[in-house]
Amino acid sequence: MAEEIGRRLPGLSFGLKAAGVSTGAPLTPADLARRVHEAYDPACAVELAAADAAGVPIQLDWSDAGPTAHEEGDRDYRHDSGRSRTWEAIKPPPGVVRDNLLERLMSPTAQASRKRVTLLYRPIDAANTATVVDRDLRAAINREGRRRGIAHAHDTADLRAAKQATDEEADGAGVVGFSILVTATVPDDAGFDAACTAVERDARSARIRLSPVYGAQSAAFAAALGVGLSLPDLSVVPHPLREHL
C-alpha cells in the first residue's frame, strides 16, 4: 500500500497545481503529528507558532497527536481546548454542479475559529459500476415519473445526468462514490451555536443537505482530519447491507 501511495503522490501533487493551487508537499511524521495535535487542541497552535518563530525545536510524535481529554455528545465533541460539531452530506446538490459550488462552504467562516471541509472518495469496483449507474438511472426516471403536470427542473437535470453517466460507463469510464464531512470548531461554548448556524447557512448556499453525525462525533472528527482513517472499513454494518443503505 505504501508503494502504491508513493507512486500516486506525484500525479496528485501536479493535479493540485493544475487546479489552481500550489503543489502539495508530503508531511513528515512530526508535521503530521503536529497538525493532528493542533486540531484537537487549537489553543496550542499559537504557542507552537511562536516556538517556530523563535527557532525553538518542537518535539512532537504520534503519541502526542490525540487529545488529552475529550467528551462526546450526540451532536458535539469536546476535546482539549475546543468544542466541535461534524456534519455529513446526506444528499448531493440537485441538478447541474458548477465549479464554484463549494466556494462559500469552503471559505473561512468568521463565527468558527476553525472549519474543515473534507471530501471523501471511494472508487466503485468495475464489476459493480454498471449496476450502480443503472440503479441511479431507474431512480431518476421514477422521480420524474412521479411528478404530474410540469416536470420539476431538478428532476429533469438529474435524469439527464444519470443518462450521461450510463453512456460514459458503457464507454469504459469509472464510477466514484463521494461524500463530504464538515467540521466547525470554537474555543468556548459562547460561540458554538453561531458557528453551527453559519456552517449550515453556507451549506444551503451550496445546495448541500448536511446533518450532524449523531452519536459518532469523535469518529467523524477523526475521519475529517484526512489522516487515512476509512470509516467504511471500521463499520460494524455488513458490507452487503451498507450497499443498500
Image (tube, rainbow, N blue to C red):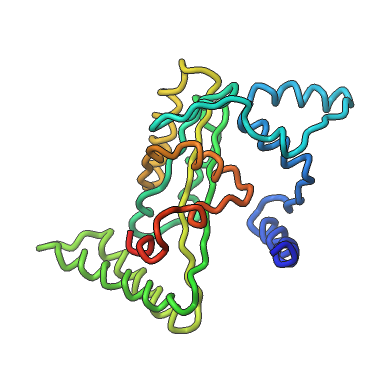
Q: What percent of the width, then of the height, locates residue 52?
A: 83, 28
In this view, the residue farthest toward the left is 149
Say which quarter of the image contains residue 81: top right
In this view, the residue farthest toward the top is 190
Tally of numbered tags: 0
In the picture, measured across the screen, residue 243 lies left or right of residue 59, that is left
Q: Nearer the viewer, residue 221 or 111?
A: 221
In the picture, measured across the screen, residue 104 lies left or right of residue 39, that is left
Image quarter in which the C terminus is found: bottom left
In this view, the residue farthest toward the bottom is 171
Image quarter in which the N terminus is found: bottom right
Q: Nearer the viewer, residue 145 or 59?
A: 59
Q: Nearer the viewer, residue 46 or 61?
A: 61
Which residue is pictured at 65% across the width and 53% down the height? 20
Say which quarter of the image contains residue 6: bottom right
Say which quarter of the image contains residue 169: bottom left
Which residue is pictured at 38% across the width and 60% down the height? 242
Q: What percent of the width, then of the height, locates residue 136?
A: 32, 69
Reply above or below: 63 against 68.
below
Which residue is pictured at 42% across the width and 45% down the height? 88
Reply above or below: 91 against 196.
below
Q: What percent of the width, then of the height, locates residue 51?
A: 82, 23
Q: What percent of the width, then of the height, locates residue 185?
A: 53, 29
